[in-house]
Image (tube, rainbow, N blue to C red):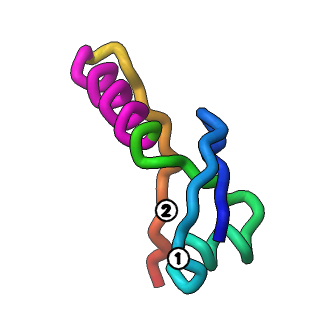
Amino acid sequence: MRVKCVLCDKIESIENESLQAKRLRNRPIHTYMCKPCETRISEKTQKRADTGNFKLYRSKVQEEEW
């Protein structure tokens, strides 16, 4: 399967039967990012988180008590 990185527009080929290919085919909201872009984004995010001025907003999971 041929895929295109959303950040750098690099076209790569991935295995047709892989889990990532299945997710891209079945759920259009999933996007592909190449490995160099993925590592660059994760490194920059980690640097910002280490400064202490970065807040990562995540939704709170509410547990239901029965």
Residue placed at 30% from the left, 25% from the top?
A: 49
Could you tell me residue 65's position as x and y percent?
45, 77
- The span from disc 1 to disc 2 (Cα, nearest Å) is 38 Å
Which label number is shown at residue 62? 2
Res 14 → quadrant: bottom right
Callout 1, which amino acid?
Glu
Q: Is residue 40 magenta?
A: yes
64 horizontally vs 26: left or right: left
33 horizontally vs 43: left or right: right
Callout 2, which amino acid?
Gln
Comparing 15 with 57, the one in front is: 15
Could you tell me residue 33's position as x and y percent?
54, 48
Say which label, 1 or 2, has the lower sequence index.
1
Question: Is disc 2 placed on a helix, strand or loop?
Answer: loop
Q: From the viewer's perspective, is residue 30 above or below residue 37?
A: below
Q: From the viewer's perspective, is residue 56 above or below residue 1?
A: above
What are the residue bounds of the magenta stretch?
A: 38-51
Question: Is disc 1 placed on a helix, strand or loop?
Answer: loop
Res 40 → quadrant: top left
Question: What residue is shown with label 1?
Answer: 15
Residue placed at 35% from the left, 25% from the top?
A: 44
